[in-house]
Each structure stands twice: as structure tokens, then as C-alpha cells.
Image (cartoon, coloured by chain):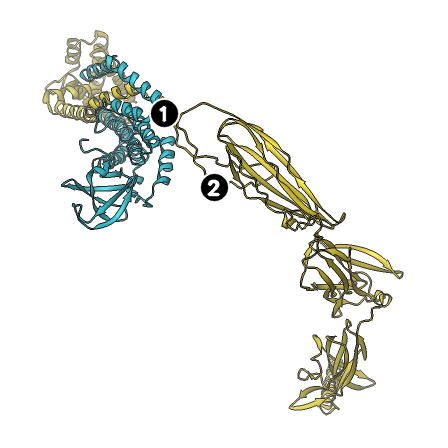
Amino acid sequence: MRLFFIISFLFLFSVNQASPLDAATDNLFFKANRLYFNGEFKAAAATYESILKNYKPGLFFNSRSCGELFYNIGNCYFRLEKNGEAILNYKRALMFIPRDADLKYNIEYLQDMIEDDISQKENIISDIFGVNFFSKTEFALLFCLINFFLFLFLSIRFFLKKEWTFYFVNIFLIFWIISGISFGVMLKETIFDHRAVILEKEVDILAGPDQGDTLLFKVHEGTMVHHERNESGFSLIRLPDGKRGWLISSAIKAIIPANN
Amino acid sequence: MKRNIHFIKKIFCFSIILFFAFSLNIYADIRVELTLDRSSVLLIDTVVAKVTVMGKRKSSFPDIDGFSFFDVVNGGSSTRLEIINGTMSSSVEYTFYLTPLKPGEFLIGPARVRIKKKTYTSSSVKVTVLKEKNNKTESENRPLFLKSLISKNNLYVNQNTLYTLKLFRREQVSNISLEMPKVEGLAFEPLAEPKKYSTIINAKRYEVIELRYVLVPKKEGGYKIPGALMRMTSYEKNRHGKVFQDPFFNMSRGKPVYLSSNEIQLNVKLLPNLNRPDNFSGLAGRFEIKTTLAPTEVKANESATLTITVKGTGNVRQIPDLKLPDVKGLKLYQDKPQLNINKGESAILGEKIMKWAIVPEKGGEYKIPVMGLSFFDPEQERYRELETEPFILTAVEVFGEKGRKINSLTRDDDAGGEIEKKDKQEIARIGKDIFPVHTSADPIKGIKQQKFFNHIFIFFILAPPFICLLLFTGKKFFKHNNKNRLFIRAKNARKEFMKKVQTRDMPPEKIHGAAIDYLNTRFLLKGGLLTSAEIQDLLIDKGVSSNTASMFKKTIASMESIIFMGEKTDNTDLIRDELIRVIKSVDQETQ
């Protein structure tokens, strides 16, 4: 236990330490906001993106401010009339701040502007386990907390065979299972998220990974697709209604980048 | 007994007589008669036709010729059995109410009935149907009559006038149905609920039911409005008093009655061409216009509401939708106009409310253009023009987020933009845009939190089960160690003792044995019987006070004398309680 407290204090100490990098980041954020309000959206987007580079993407914990930055970048691209990039960044923000009313409104607003009428399939399992309602960080924190209490009461029960310890252990065991499954579903959704957004105004979807292949259909900027694989500069995509085809890889961007 | 037999005999004889009387009836003379209550009727009258089959109480339904020129209502049938001066007669009577469809002389009958495969025929009767005389006095003497009135006989096209129907009645009536005259180019629109009142005509009290309609001529020309037709069931007044005048209590069957109102002559003129305004839309009546603009000063890109209300009497459904001309720098969004119609006592009142949301794109002063509306006033027989008030809308420029744009909404986008009530107004969307950037975010804190939590997450996930496992293993190890096990047993010696002596009236041997077991377990002795003297020495040796040790010795000694020397005792519970207290002291002193 002593070791646990020492480690915790060391971390806390490291968190509260101010560094020159903090001041630079702070300045960058205010600069980006100022640029946005002055109508210099391109510069504002670049500045927000430079702040994001300081974030080391974690598998479990991601700060809420990360979502706010993606949201601000989305706004910049919307003003630059790059609806594809805007949707991409809003969708990224949604993973960190899924209940943000502004973000939801802006996504809905942009969805209305998209030319292609493709309805996304609803994932019932995700809905049941609240994956669309809580962020990954919230799930991780919740699981940590329940995990802590479960083993705390289990330890108490080893030495104190009282009735109340039995009930506490069982209650937390149920919560532990539910939150564990939810957290697992969330991780699965994140790790196997192959969604990508069309960035160009209009893209030809071909029958094969070659410019000479038959044109199957066309998709437009902002449409969300499922990226299956890459081949010689082309990407195979699938639409929610089941249509598949190849397009130039540069025309799409994955919501979760490959290096994450 | 004798009297009873006599009575039964009398009844038997009477039954025999009755049987023969009815039997004789079979051979009675069967006749069929057709009668009318009058031979001359007016077109609006109802004749009662009766077919009487005499000499029989049952027959087939009569088949009567000559009914094709009448509207026939079956009045039902009645049977009759009469014994007059010992002569018995029976008959069945069928009643029909005939309303003539056209004037002329008609032959009704013969009526035919079938009785036991034999057909009996009546004679025929003549009836003369006369055209209704336009004699006011004669009609007003009837117990039921219908009258139509018009407020004006000379009208302009689209000019509204009041058409009134009055039913005068001295008889009880029910099941009233009305058929309004149908004339091409004339439209009738009912006004408020029918009015009921009493009046006196020719010294007779009549109950009056008044129905009011607005008559709107759509085309010019001379019209002869035929009378309205009213059908009802009338109940003649009987002598049983007021309560029984009600149809509910009236035992007699109601008589169907057809009433027709008088014809009306109407002349409709075209609206004059002289001084007809260009924007005239066919509106005739009396109208006024009211305009409001609220607020008159707004920020740029915010909205003000222009409301125009046209109200009046006349052909209100034809109030045109006014068009607000485009003004440079102003965006105009019109709501769906709302038409409210109120049916008054003698006219139709209406108001049309038209609203616009006006959004100035920039700061400045904007003149809201004047809109005109013209109508024909039939009272003054001239065209009149109305104009909306001129308004100036002041817009104040607000400096804010640059690059902001307002995207116009279509009516479909603006869900529920319609104005529901006069006082309350639903919020209508004027523009649509995304929400701005989040400036309250703290990226530094975010970066630090992310680093911190990512570092310790695994620790938080794995540490609790690991610690728990350690505790579990430690406990198991501790329990399985022999030395520890004995130590634990020693700690629990008093609990074991308490379990053994918990019941009352225990034999002293058992209490003694439990006390010796306690000492062996508590002080990890090898076992065996200890004397009271040995116990005292042992306890003092283990650090127990001499007082407690002496008390222990004394208690054990008293039990030994009971067990081994046969000393008698009334209650071993006192010794047990004493021993419990002493053992508790021993435990406390050797902690």
C-alpha cells in the first residue's frame, strides 16, 4: 500500500508541474481562437492541429479537451467549405465528447448538406451498452472505479464474513461484469473502427483498383464509408447499403488514423 | 262446493257461445273499402287514405292503384272487434298519408287484399289536387306553415344578403328535415343556431322556429328562388292536457307533413365598371385594414414581424393574400395567412391575418412598402380602397464573428412556423448556422490528464485484484502454518468455551471439562487434567493477577468437590457464570 501511495504522489507531482511547453500550448490555443474569430480559418485549423500533436493518443484515456480541439478544427473546415474534413473532425470529436450538444447540432447541420442520402445502420449492441453515450475515457474510469470497489469488498470479506460484505461483493460483481462488457465493446468498436469520410467533392467508385476500371457509382464529399483495404494507391470501400467499390486512397481519410 | 261447480259450468257455457260466435264470423260478409279524408286538396296538403277490410281481422297488405303521383307514407294498421246488441263485427284498417307531387285530378284505387287465396277489391276514389294559392291569409290560418324572407331583393354580384326561413306551428312536430332551394348561381350558407320564439297571428299563438342563411349571388340575372321544403311529423292537439301534448305521451300516431315556403324574386346586378380599381379582386362588403410592425428597431440579421389584418363582413373568403414587395437589403419570410370566420346573427364576419418575418441584412433604415386592398361597398354603391400604414424599420449593425453567414430557410425547414393563436406566436427559424468554436477548453490540463491516466490506468486495473490475491494467499498461508493455527486456536479459546457452556442447567462435569479445555487451548498445553492448585500456579506463571488466579482456583475447586466428593448443589449456573467472568478476566490480563 505504501508503494501505491508513493507512486500516486509521484504522478500527481509530475501532473502539477508547470513547464515552458504549457505556456506555449496555452498561447497557441488562444492564438487559434483569435485567428478563427478574425476569419483566418485555415491558419486557425493549422494551429489547433499543432496543439493536437502534443497529445499522445492513449488506448484508454483521452482528455475531453482533445474532443474540443477536433470540434474547433471541424468548425474551421466548415467555414473553409471543406465539409468532408469538417465531418471527419466532428466524428473524431464525437469519440471524446459524445454528449456535447453543439457538436451534435453541427453534425446534424452538416449531414443535411451532404448530397448522398445514405442512412447509417444502427448498432444495437453499441446502443445497449451505451457505447454511443459514453466516451472511452468515461468507460475506462467507470471500470477502474468498480474494479477498485469490487476487490476492496472482496478483500474485506476474506477477513470479515459478515452478511453485508456478501451483498456488496455481489452487487459490485454485477456492475463489474456489465461495465467490463461495455468497456470491451467500446474497445472493440475503437480498434476495429474502419470508418472513413470522403473528402473530395465527387469521387468515382470503380470496379477495380485501376483508373481504367468500370465506373460503378459516384459518392460525394462528407459521405461516410467503411474502408476495407488498400491496393496500389486505391482503397476498397463499402457503403452502409452494401455497395462496394474502389476509389483513389487520397479521396478518403479514416476517422481513426492507422497509426492509432 | 256446489257453488263452485255452478260457476265452472257458467264459464264453460260462455266459452261455447264465444266459440260459436267466432265460428260464425268465418262466414261473415267480407268487404274492402277505400276512403280519403277529403276529395280536394292543395299541393302542400297531406291526404289520409284508409283501406278498411270488414268482416276479417287479418288480410294481406293492400295493393292500391294510383299512388304513383303521391309521396306515400305508411301509417300502420289497426284491428277492431265490436259486439253491438249481440252482433259481432271485426275489421282491419290500413292508413296511408299521401302528399301530392303535382296538381291535377287523380283516381286512387281500387285497393285489393287477399284473404285465404281470394282477392277482395274496393271501389276507387277521385281526388283533386289544386295548386297552392298565394293567399297569405289562408296559409296563415293553418296550424303549420313555412315562410321565407329575404332582406334585399336587388343585389350586386357577391353582395351578401340575409335569407330567413320561419316555421310557424300550433301543433307538436318532430323529425323535421329541410331541403333548401337549389338555384344555380346562388349559394346559401347557414348562420348561427336556429332561434325559437312565440308570436300571435290572427289572434292565434304560434311557436316560430327561425333559420337564417347568408345568400350570396355569384352571377348576375333575375332569379326566382323556389320555396324551401320542410318535412316533419305533426301530432294533432288532443284534449288530455298539456302533458299529453308531447309526442312522447301522445298515443295517436303522428301524421307526416310536407311544407313549402313561398317563392322569392331576386335581381342581381353586375358590379359597376366605373372607377373599378386595378387591384380589385371581387371583394364585396365592408372591410377595414390594420397594420403593425414589432419591433420597429432590430439588430442586423434579427427579425421584426409585420402583421396585416383585414377584417369585415361580406364575402370574407375572398379576402386576397397581400404581397409584400421585395425591398433591397431585407429578407422576407411570409407565414401562411390565417383566416378566421365568425358566423354572427345576420352576417358572416371574417378576418385574415398575414404575417411576415423581416430580416435586415445590414444596418440602416428600411421603408416597408404600402400595400393596397380594394372592395365594393354595396351600401354606398362604390368601390373603396384601403392601404396599409407606412413603417420604417431601423436595423442596427452588430459586429461579431466574421465570415458568419445566414442560410435562408425554406418553409419545409421551418417546422411549425405557422401562427396558432392571436396572443402567442411560435418561434420561427430565421437562419441556420453551426455553433461556434469552444474557447473554454483547457488543452494543457487535457494533455497532463491524458499522460497521467494513461500511466496509471494499468496500475489501477491490476492493483486491486493483485492486492486482493496477496491478501487471500497470505491468509491461506497463515492459516495452514501449524504454529499459527495453534496461535489462532489460543485466540479463539474463550469463544470455544462459551459455545460449550451456553446452555443452562449443565452438569458440573461438562463445565469442568470445558474450563480445562480452555486452559489447555489458551496456553497451548499438552492436555491432561489439571488440579485447582496447578491451575493457580499456571495462571500466575502466564502473567494473570494472583487475585484472578485465586478466583479461578476457587471456582475449579468448588466444582471438583461437587464432582469427586459428591457435594450437593442446587444450581450449577452460578458456578458457570462465575467461571465465565473469571475466564474473561484471564483473557484480558493475558492479551
Would residue B45 be visible to someone looking at this image? yes
Would residue A64 be visible to someone looking at this image? no
Q: Is residue A232 left or right of residue B150?
A: left
Residue visible at 29% across and 21% down?
Answer: B443
The chain displayed yellow equals B
Residue B60's quadrant in the figure? bottom right
Whether marks 1 and 2 lie on the same chain: no
Q: Which residue is mark 1?
A: A39
Whole-percent x, y for residue B241 in the image: 82, 62
Which amino acid type corresponds to the residue marked 1 in the rendered image?
Gly
Image marks 1 and 2: residues in contact by CB distance under 8 Å: no
Whole-percent x, y for residue B452 in the image: 23, 20
Residue B374's quadrant in the figure? top right
Q: Which colour is chain A painted? A: cyan
Where, quadrant-wise, is the C terminus of chain B in this rendering? top left
Q: Which residue is mark 2?
A: B415
Q: Residues within 10 Å of mark 2 (few under 14, many from 20)?
A: few
Whole-percent x, y for residue B124 in the image: 76, 86
Q: Nearer the viewer, residue B382 or B483?
A: B382
Q: Chain of mark 1?
A: A
Q: Chain of mark 2?
A: B
